[in-house]
Image (cartoon, rainbow, N blue to C red):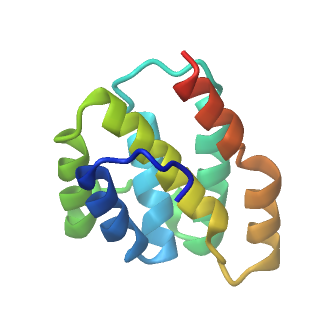
């Protein structure tokens, strides 16, 4: 974990997130970042684009189909648990979620390199916590 001041709700949700497959971590990250309900003074659009490119590499059919998020019941459950968090907890969870993805080994050198070079977790963390 990146932060040391997380609540039990955030830690429990992170444990569930950590148990997801890599492709599902990316799907959930895209969904949560696209549906943020708090203001971020950071360009999350670039992170979403990066995640969509990674998802396209992990699932070649991703860009050819309309994704029905309802078919991923475990992701719906996690997103519902995310909605139960207050704004500060949501911010902390998104930081930890991105840090988890940053540390994930995707078993693909190119994807790992893209994540390490273009996922600016520390900058995102700084922009959220220093407001």
Residue at 52% x, 69% y is 61
- Numbered disc total: 0
Outermost residue toward the front? Answer: 4
- Quarter of the image for the C terminus: give it: top right
Residue at 65% x, 77% y is 106
Residue 46 falls in image quadrant: top right
* Residue closer to the observer: 102 or 107: 102
**Relative to 50, 23 lies left or right:** left
Asked if 20 appears above or below 114 in the picture, the reply is: below
* Residue closer to the observer: 11 or 61: 11
Residue 63 falls in image quadrant: bottom right
* Residue closer to the observer: 58 or 99: 99
Residue 86: x percent and y percent?
24, 32
Q: Is residue 45 visible?
A: no
Outermost residue toward the bottom? Answer: 107
Asked if 127 appears above or below 85 in the picture, the reply is: above
Residue 59: x percent and y percent?
55, 72
Residue 9: x percent and y percent?
23, 52
Residue 43 falls in image quadrant: top right
Asked if 108 appears above or below 43 in the picture, the reply is: below
């Amino acid at each position: 974990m990146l932060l040391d001041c997380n609540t039990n709700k955030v830690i429990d949700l992170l444990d569930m997130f950590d148990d997801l497959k890599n492709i599902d971590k990316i799907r959930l990250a895209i969904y949560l970042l696209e549906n943020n309900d708090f203001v971020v003074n950071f360009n999350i659009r670039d992170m979403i684009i990066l995640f969509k490119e990674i998802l396209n590499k992990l699932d070649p059919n991703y860009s050819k189909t309309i994704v029905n998020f309802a078919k991923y019941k475990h992701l719906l459950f996690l997103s519902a648990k995310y909605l139960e968090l207050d704004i500060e907890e949501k911010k902390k969870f998104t930081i930890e979620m991105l840090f988890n993805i940053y540390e994930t080994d995707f078993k693909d050198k190119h994807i790992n390199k893209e994540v390490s070079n273009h996922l600016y977790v520390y900058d995102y963390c700084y922009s959220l916590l220093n407001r």
